[in-house]
Image: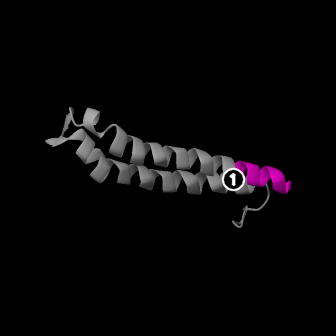
Amino acid sequence: MDNNNYWRANIRLMGILLTIWFTVSFGFGILLKDWLNEIQFFGFKFGFWWAQQGSIYVFIILIFVYTAMMRRIDKEHGVSDEDDE
């Protein structure tokens, strides 16, 4: 196991996911809110809906993506705590 490659992959994944998180919460929820509010979505302005609901869905998806990708990274670098049966 190369410890440097493991942490490089881990930090790279975290950087990507945090960038998505920042874009969704700050970008869509604040910066693009006025532009998104011009779109109607289920009877609500889309910017409002996105800030209140849409971003939460993305955050939940990011949790599942992080879990799946870390399992893969752990297995690739031999640090998985799961049984390989």
Give the percent coordinates (x, y) of residue 18: 54, 49
Secondary structure found at label 1 = helix
Residue plotted at (63% across, 48% down)? 13
Residue plotted at (30% across, 49% down)? 51
Give the percent coordinates (x, y) of residue 66: 57, 54
Quarter of image, res 45? top left
Dot 1: within a 10 Å radius of its alpha carbon, few (fewer than 14), some, or many (20 or more) residues? some
Q: State whether the magenta stretch is mostly helix, strand or loop.
A: helix
Quarter of image, res 84? bottom right
Quarter of image, res 24? top left
Residue plotted at (68% across, 51% down)? 11
Q: Is residue 81 above or below residue 27?
A: below
The C terminus appears in which quarter of the rendering? bottom right
Q: Is residue 78 above or below residue 20?
A: below
Residue plotted at (45% across, 51% down)? 61
Q: Which residue is mark 1?
A: 10
Q: Is residue 76 visible?
A: no
Q: Is residue 35 magenta?
A: no
Horizontal side, residue 4 vs residue 67: left or right = right
Q: Which residues are magenta?
A: 1-9
Q: Residue furthest left?
A: 43
Q: Nearer the viewer, residue 69 or 29?
A: 29
The N terminus appears in which quarter of the rendering? bottom right
